[in-house]
Image (cartoon, helix red, strand yellow):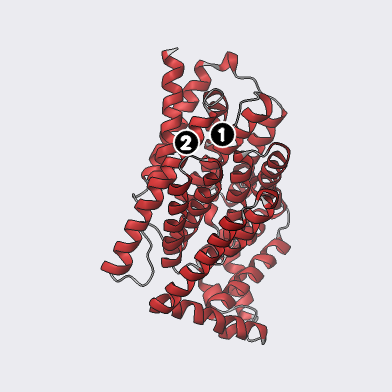
Amino acid sequence: MNKYLSINNFALLSLFLVPALLLSTNNFSVVVVALIVFFSIYYLIKNRAHCDFNKYDLLITGCLGAYFFANLPITIVDGSTFRYFQGGSRLLLCIPIYLMFRKAFILRSAQAYEWLSIGIIVGSIGTLVLAIYQFFILNMPRIDGFLFSINFGYLACSLAFLALCLSIKSKYNNLLLLAFIASIISTILTITRGAIFAIPILLIFCAVLNWKKLSLKLTSTVIVGFIVLSLATYWNSDSVKQRIDYTAYEVSHIISGDIKAATSTGTRFYLWKAATEAFKQSPFIGLPYDEREALNKQLYAEGKVNEYTRDLNRGHAHSQYFEMLASNGILGIVAIIMMLVVPLVVFIQHYRKTNSLGGYTGAVFVAGFMLFCLTEAPLQANLISAFYGFMLATFFALVRIEKYNAIQQPN
């Protein structure tokens, strides 16, 4: 009994520590994920006789392992670096976490949601404190915490919507709503357009998923609060105002067909064009980094891309989708479907059938990353891929328990 209690307690503690330490510390949450990986492998070895495995488990294993295995052929062809595995290895290592969580939380699902909620509250507050310190005291034009500002923005936005979704069925609902606001402020202070523009889209997605039980008061409060917060930030922050004005300037040039004048957004179009050309050259497994660099130089000589695209290391596409298209070919498309589309479908279907909090929160969480992946390749980053894999493992495990163990959900 003590053995199982210690396993349960350690698993619950990780649900608190990972979001609590996510952005307020320098990669400490990755350390927690690494520890839980080792612990889960030990647990599975010790309890291998009792580890049943069904079709759902097989599907989840495929979701968490697809990114890694899609990179096997190109790594062999390249023969000079294991960098291709940078993101996929983190997701792969979350498979044993899932397999342990599906057992550890069978009798403690409600506690799992509670510990996760508290961790998100603490993490959101810590993130806001760090954001305020960097923006107002250090006078940084874009806060970045211990990361690049773009990655900080994505993770802060992710924390915000985890808080919002969990607030629906939590005794900490008021604190979770405050955590949502705190993380939204942190997101805005990064000036990360991909994260900021995701906010209204995810709010709409939340409403669509939950429209039958939508509270007019809550919906109005969130919408009005977001508009007021956005306008206040725009008029009181020069850096935010400049960023939004510059975005409008770029969009106007793109609409008129002058892509070169849209330095930031226009460059992404060139990068995506180069990635598409790489896919055409090797559609099955993609092109290795050195060949992508050579291709980009050739495209520049032909006047098809700009100087930034020509000189970029590894031919990076600044989009998870185009990056995997270029580096993994058709295998990359399969991996994208497995690690983003399939989880979204699994969570939405389960939510519609059972009104599951895990299904609802998991669906919004994955939808957020689907948006983030449009203009960056966040799942290549160490912290983000570890966090994404850990949260997928958590929600997959909670959904499995609800599907096969008939455990009552939080009220």
Query: Contact (CB < 8 A) between labels 1 and 2?
Result: yes
Label number found at residue 84: none
Left or right, 377 with reference to 179 = right
| Above or below, comparing residue 258 to residue 154 in the picture | below
Left or right, 362 with reference to 155 = right
Query: In this rendering, which labeled residue sits more in front, label 1 or label 2?
Result: 1
Label number found at residue 114: 2
Report the quarter where the C terminus lies: top right
The amino acid at mark 1 is: Pro
- Residue shown at 52% from the left, 51% from the top: 164
Left or right, 335 with reference to 107 = right
Residue 147 seen anywhere in this rendered image of the structure: yes
**Residue 66 on image: x %, y %:** 64, 42
Q: Which residue is mark 1?
A: 410
Report the quarter where the N terminus lies: top left
Structural distance between the alpha carbons of marks 1 and 2: 9 Å
